Image: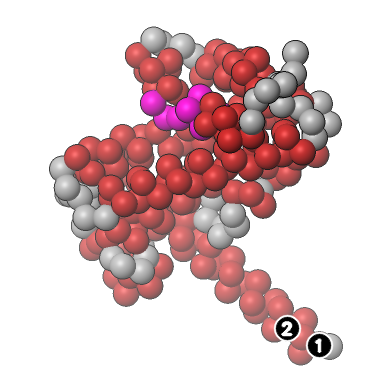
Amino acid sequence: MEGTHKRRYVSDLRREHAEATRLRIAEAARALMIERGFAATTMGDVAAAAGVAVQTLYAACPGGKPGLVKLVYDVTLAGDGRQVPQSGRPPVQAIIEEPDPVRKLGLYAAMAVAILGRIGPVHRVLRAAAAAGGAGVGDLLDETERQRRTGSRRLAGHLAEVGALRAGLTADRAADEAYVLTSIEVYERFVDVCGWSVAAYEEWLARTLAGALLTP
């Protein structure tokens, strides 16, 4: 039994160390990419800024620079270095457990806005890199959109399961509406172009989602 506890302790320490390393690499790479752009950020620069060996960087980012970009995106999306899927994180569990559909969508809007605020600067860098032909960046952006659509389908399916979708609205159509309303493009139009505060956008998003998806 003592050996089991010791192995678990060592395993936990290794996991925590790996998560801390992932976070340090992602933060260093994100800062450099936002400052210099995608093309001007080298793997060597990131390793030096993160305080890790280049070999460690490549081990943490399989595939080289495209792998590094994916790590930056994933860590920024999650807000930490833990390798836990978004569906298993506390904000998603809180949405599922909330009994009131309007408050569910309020929590969903808050989660979406928090993610958009974190990911916005990275997304702009990646869009510019994809337009310039950055290796693997376009594929990554396509994959992130597929993941967003999957998340929207989960929300719509959950609302359908609890009988909250308005009459005549299919789960597929509800998923499409949630997907578009929570897009980075809509967020940027309101906040960056129209000058709305993030709080104002979040209130609008929650209200609009409820009006579009729920039974009055």
- Give the distance between the C-alpha atoms of the residues marked 2 and 1, in whole angstroms: 6 Å
What span is in magenta?
Answer: 178-185
Please name the residue that numbered disc 1 is placed on: 2
Residue at the image point whose x is 23% and y is 38% from the top: 128
Residue 103: percent from left, percent from top = 75, 24
Residue 130: percent from left, percent from top = 23, 44
Mark 1 neighbour class, 10 Å CA radius: few under 14, some 14 to 19, many 20 or more? few
Mark 2 neighbour class, 10 Å CA radius: few under 14, some 14 to 19, many 20 or more? few
> Given the image, on which type of amino acid does mark 1 rest?
Glu
> Given the image, on which type of amino acid does mark 2 rest?
Lys
Q: Which secondary structure, mark 2? A: helix
Residue 102: percent from left, percent from top = 74, 22
Image quarter where the C terminus lies is top right
Residue at the image point whose x is 59% and y is 40% from the top: 153
Q: Is residue 48 among what the camera can see?
A: no
Residue at the image point whose x is 35% and y is 40% from the top: 122
Q: Is residue 134 among what the camera can see?
A: yes
Q: In this view, does 129 lie to the left or right of 83?
A: left
Q: Which secondary structure, mark 1? A: helix
Magenta span contains residue 211: no
Residue 210: percent from left, percent from top = 67, 19
Please name the residue that numbered disc 2 is placed on: 6
Q: Are marks 2 and 1 in contact (CB under 8 Å)?
A: yes
**Prevailing secondary structure of the magenta residues:** helix
- Looking at the rendering, which quadrant does residue 200 occupy? top right
Q: In this view, does 63 lie above or below 130?
A: below
